[in-house]
Image (tube, helix red, strand yellow):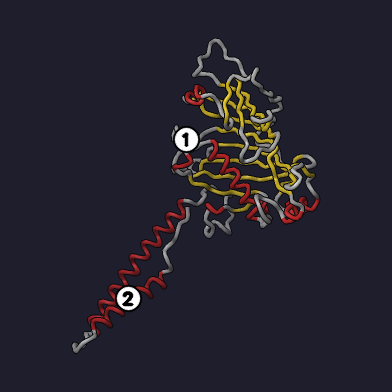
Amino acid sequence: MALHLAAPRSSILNKQEMCISQRISNSTTGNMKPNLNNHTGRLKIKLANVAAENLIKLNKAMNKLELFCWKQAGKVDENTVNHVDIFSGRLFKGGRVFQQHFLIRSYELGPDSKISVGALVNLLQESALNHFKSVVLVAEGFGSTPEMSKRNLIWVVLSMQIVIDSYSSWGDIVQVETWSCASGRHGARRDWLVRDYNTGKTLLRAVCVYVMLNKKTRKLSKFIQETREETKGMFMDHCDPIIEQDCRKLRDLDFDTADYIRTGLLNAPESVVETHKLSAMRLEFRKECGKNSSLQSLCALARETHETETDDDREIEMDHTLRLVENGSQILRARTVWMPRN
């Protein structure tokens, strides 16, 4: 959402003066001689009114901009706070941390009038790519550096873990902070922290591990030294994951072990979605799929229900497998955690 301020007062007054002068000129055509003193007096009054009106408009516009500025001390670079729109993003810690604000749109909401999980993941991807773009590392595609582009390399997601504490509503503003560091010898890890703009409350935490893939051979590649040199200015030397890693092994589901089977994207049974909301998920990607691929989603209960709990009051963990219909190859394995809506 862009905020357009009024034009500088001098330019506005010049335009208004030209219009008034034109009207005076038009009124002087004919045999009658104009009363210059009267016209000059009215001109001064009109210019004064225009100056006052536009000054009020400018002040209102500045007040609106100030309402969108992050007010917590130390959160914003003093050199950019008054000049940079927060929705365009800004860099911290020498370019290693990127911060951007997003307005929640009506079309990003789910049936419960809260932002959908898909829209949340889109915000994570957008902020990550904007981080690369802000430090002028994007050559082409999604986050490919110049050296990666020369070698036909791209980033692909190997695993992802998300914890959702609360969902935003229509019109809310969320602040996304993201940073990266190396992960092992051949990967990179990116962390996200999403907060509510007005309250500072943490809404979401996420960790994602990326690796390089050759676009032509479709095989994984090493984290080349040239790219390490390109990205060392934006990568943290070391940072602990913002989420404690879940080391539990994910199940491989088949027709015999699945409780719920459907053709389409990863999903949970409607009976769970109607009474629960997604609280956390962990994804491990196994294989690529094409745009015309038919996918099959298998889902099974991962944790047994306690006898003292009812279906609507308990936390539910579910295992998921997404695979190709034609040959049964696994696309990903996942585990989701669902909390009661109430």
Q: Residue at x 55, y 21 (%)?
A: 315
Q: Is residue 258 visible?
A: yes
Instruction: Find residue 18 and report its image quarter.
Output: bottom left
Q: Which residue is drawn at 61% across and 21% down?
A: 300
Give the percent coordinates (x, y) of residue 135: 66, 56
User: Where's residue 301, x and y in %?
Assistant: 60, 19
In the visual, does 12 lie left or right of 91?
A: left
Q: Is residue 303 above or below residue 222?
A: above
Residue 255's x, y, as percent? 64, 20
Left or right of residue 65, residue 261 in this image = right
Q: Please tell me whether mark 2 sits on a helix, a strand or a loop.
A: helix
At mark 1, the secondary structure is: loop
| Residue with the most extreme top position | 307
How crowded pointer 2 is (Cα within 10 Å; few <14, some 14-19, many 20+) is rated as: few
As drawn, 6 above or below 134:
below
Residue 36 place in picture, x, y as percent: 24, 85
Residue at image x 70%, y 41%?
Answer: 210
State the residue in front, 187 or 34. Answer: 187
The circle on residue 110 is: 1
Q: Name the residue under label 2.
A: 19
